[in-house]
C-alpha cells in the first residue's frame, strides 16, 4: 500500500538523521545545520503525508484502510518528534555562534510543537475511527426504498447529527 510506503520512507529518512547525530561526539556548526536541514525535510515529508491522508478521506476510503493509514502516519509523526527532541538536545551541546544556536533551537522547538499538534490530531482521528459505531437499520436510511413512516427512519440531517454531532 502506498501509504505504508510513504510512512516507511519518512521514518527511514529520520533514521538517517538519527545516525548522523549518533556518529558525531561533538557536533560542529556545519554538522548541526545539516541535522536541522534533515529535520526540516522530514517535517515537510510529514506534512505531505498528512495531505495524502486528507486526500484519501476526501476521495472516500474505507474505515479499516484509513485506520491503518492513520496508524502509519502516527508512527512517522512520533518518530519525527523523537528525532526533533534529540536534535534539540544535541544542539545545546554543539559548538556554534550564539545567534546560530538561538536560531537553531527556535527552529527545532517549532518543529517539536508542530509535530505535537499533528500527533494530537492523528491520535484524535485514530480514537474516533476505533470507536465502535451503533448499528443503523437499513430501513431507516433515506433512499428510494426507505419508508419515511418506518419506525426509526432518519432523514439525512438527522443521520448527520447522529453520526457527527454526538460524536458517535
Image: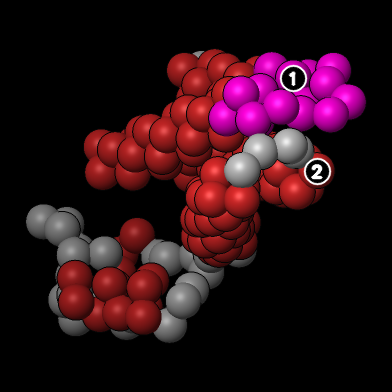
Q: Which residue is mark 1?
A: 20
Residue at 83 percent across and 21 percent down: it is 24
From the viewer's perspective, tell me whether residue 157 is left or right of residue 151: left
Find residue 43 and report its horizontal and vertical position in percent.
49, 37
Disc 2 is placed on an element classified as helix
Find residue 152 and report its horizontal and vertical position in percent.
34, 80
Disc 1 is placed on an element classified as helix
What residue occupies the far right of the structure in this picture?
25
Residue sitting nearer the eye, 15 or 149? 15
Quadrant of the rendered image containing residue 142? bottom left
Q: Which residue is mark 2?
A: 93
The CA span between labels 2 and 1 is 15 Å
Badge 1 density bin: few <14, some 14–19, many ≥20, Cα 10 Å: some
> Does residue 54 lie above or below 121 as drawn?
above
* Range of residues picked out in magenta: 16-33
Magenta segment includes 58: no
Amino acid at each position: 500500500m502506498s501509504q505504508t510506503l510513504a510512512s516507511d520512507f519518512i521514518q527511514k529518512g529520520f533514521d538517517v538523521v538519527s545516525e548522523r547525530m549518533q556518529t558525531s561526539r561533538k557536533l560542529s556548526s556545519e554538522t548541526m545545520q545539516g541535522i536541522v536541514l534533515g529535520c526540516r525535510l522530514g517535517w515537510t515529508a510529514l506534512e505531505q503525508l498528512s495531505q495524502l491522508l486528507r486526500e484519501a478521506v476526501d476521495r472516500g476510503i474505507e474505515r479499516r484502510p484509513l485506520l491503518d493509514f492513520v496508524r502509519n502516519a502516527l508512527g512517522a509523526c512520533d518518530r519525527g518528534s523523537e528525532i526533533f527532541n534529540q536534535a534539540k538536545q544535541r544542539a545545546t551541546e554543539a559548538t556554534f555562534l550564539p545567534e546560530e544556536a538561538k536560531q537553531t533551537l527556535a527552529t527545532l522547538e517549532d518543529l517539536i510543537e508542530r509535530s505535537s499538534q499533528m500527533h494530537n490530531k492523528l491520535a484524535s482521528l485514530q480514537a474516533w475511527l476505533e470507536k465502535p459505531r451503533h448499528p443503523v437499520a437499513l430501513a431507516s436510511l433515506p433512499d428510494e426504498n426507505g419508508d419515511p413512516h418506518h419506525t426509526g427512519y432518519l432523514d439525512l440531517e438527522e443521520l448527520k447529527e447522529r453520526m457527527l454531532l454526538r460524536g458517535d
